[in-house]
Image: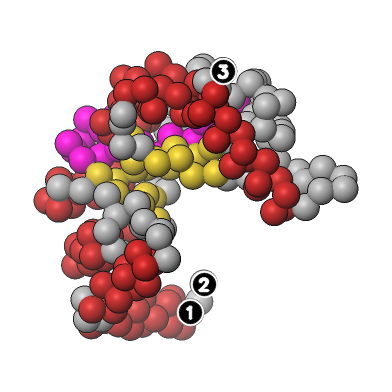
Amino acid sequence: MTPEQEGAQKAAAEDLRKWRLSLPHDVFTAFRKKYADAGILIKVLKVDNINSFSGDEVDYSFTVGRLLGAQALSTEIPLSASKRIGQFADKHKMLIGYHGHTNLTDPEAFGSPQSWETAMSYAKYSGWNLDLGHFLAATNLSPVPFLEKYHDRISHLHLKDRKLNMGPNVPWGQGDTPIAECLRLIRDKKWDIMGAIEMEHPTPQGSDAMTELAKCIDFCRKALLEG
């Protein structure tokens, strides 16, 4: 960027910071009530680029999450940044789940179990947004043992079905991801862990996104009621 562009970006970031910090709390409590009245709980608040925030903006993010009724934040940041952000999680006593994909070669990426273990060593409330499909496809490891070991540090699950060896996303039940096993484990252990459906497989010919989403919901229902 040119110096002028950099200056404009910094000015915009400062304006956004001031706007965030000026918002009254009742904005968020009213938003929470709107969802609660519809029977919807806000369990996790996703905050992107939180590693670029000033300290007061990070505090703001955790405050907003609590006002909305969330039990955790979720974010995608470099591993090294989790050392700083984890201190805020401990300060607010609210879990923050770090989300990763399938990059096992970049030391800053959340891809291998060791990445999350390192982040969790930095702070008590640093946690794991466990994406079952990405984790299995990247590592060729079942996520079940890690769910069992770190269940108290898992903010929530991302549910999708993928094949081993960096295989594709596929319609649920056609891949290698133990979605049903993980859901039943949470049910049987009575862990307070939310599963978020991420319907990332291609829509089959003759179907549509809403039909496929309904199939995913039915898959979860059958796994929990019939298993």
Q: Residues within 10 Å of mark 1 (few under 14, many from 20)?
A: few
| 35 up-or-down from 160: above or below | below
| Quadrant of the image occupied by residue 122 | top left
Where residue 172 appears, as percent x and y from the top left, is: 67, 32
Residue at 37 percent across and 72 percent down: it is 34
Q: Name the residue under label 1.
A: 5
Q: Locate residue 114 relative to residue 136 in the image: left or right.
A: left
Q: Mark 2 points at which residue?
A: 1
Of the residues under marks 2 and 3, which one precedes in the sequence?
2
Q: Do the residues labelled 2 and 1 touch (CB within 8 Å)?
A: yes
Q: How crowded is mark 2: few (under 14 residues within 10 Å), some or many (20 or more)?
A: few
Whether residue 79 can be seen here: no
The three-letter code of the residue at mark 1 reads Gln
Mark-to-mark CA distance, 2 and 1: 6 Å
| 129 up-or-down from 112: above or below | below
Mark-to-mark CA distance, 3 and 1: 44 Å
Residue at 71 percent across and 45 percent down: it is 212
Segment colored magenta: 118-138
Q: Mark 3 points at which residue?
A: 140
Q: What element carries label 2?
A: loop
Of all residues, the one furthest to the front in this rendering is: 225
In the image, 173 versus 20, the foreground residue is 173
